[in-house]
Amino acid sequence: MRRMIFGNRKKKAEANRKIVDGLAIFAPAAGEMTPLTYIDDPGFAESYEGQGIIIRPTGDQVASPIIGTVEKVYDNGRAVMLTIAFGVTVLVYVGLKTDQLKKKHFTTFVSEGEIVGPGDVLIRFDRKGLEEAGSDAMIRLVVCDNEIYEQFELPEVKTIDELELIAALAYISFS
């Protein structure tokens, strides 16, 4: 049996567990971080199951939060799906109420198949332009693979710096 657990999970360790891989997740932008559950966006929730965070950015770019491969760059320029070796996918999505804008205010800097690391710029956006259009520049980061990790504790509201470590996931094998 294999499970994924989040950094500060409060659970007694099993004697026969073996960590076989890990994943550090860094903040893709500076700003105020809150749990993903703080957003009221049913369409997004139905499309992307998983746990994650929201960042209300202070800047205008999104960096890769992990070392991984760009699985998908969405046509709208607002989202990038990343994967890592043991199959975990991480979605980074910019904006709320941005469907009517198409690609306006967004520029992507990566291509599908490209390997990225923490700090590599994925997306730049015009935060002021989004606000003027009545949209929100929030950044959503979702760890999508519920089958291979346990529920993890969501962070409290806090201010973070870009590339601050926000989570450490361990891929564990139980014998």
Image (cartoon, rainbow, N blue to C red):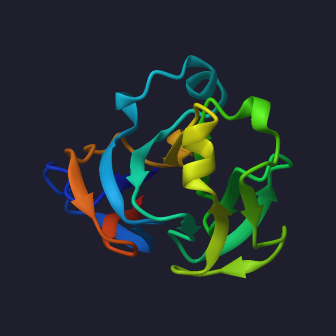
Please give left or right for residue 161 compared with residue 73 in the image: left
- Comparing 108 with 84, the one in front is 108
Residue 19 sits above or below residue 91 on the image: below
> Is residue 93 something that shows in the picture?
no
> Is residue 28 something that shows in the picture?
yes
Q: Position of residue 42 (x, y in %)?
A: 56, 18
Residue 94 sits above or below residue 8 on the image: above
Residue drawn at point x = 76 percent, y = 63 percent: 107
Residue 113 sits above or below residue 38 on the image: below
Please give left or right for residue 57 compared with residue 94 in the image: left
- Comparing 62 with 137, the one in front is 137
Dividing the picture into quadrants, the one containing residue 164 is bottom left
Q: Position of residue 80 (x, y in %)?
A: 70, 57
Residue drawn at point x = 40 percent, y = 49 percent: 56
On the rendered image, what quadrant is the C terminus found in? Answer: bottom left
Residue 116 sits above or below residue 96 on the image: below
Total tally of numbered discs in the picture: 0
Q: Position of residue 63 (x, y in %)?
A: 55, 71
Query: Outermost residue toward the front?
Result: 132
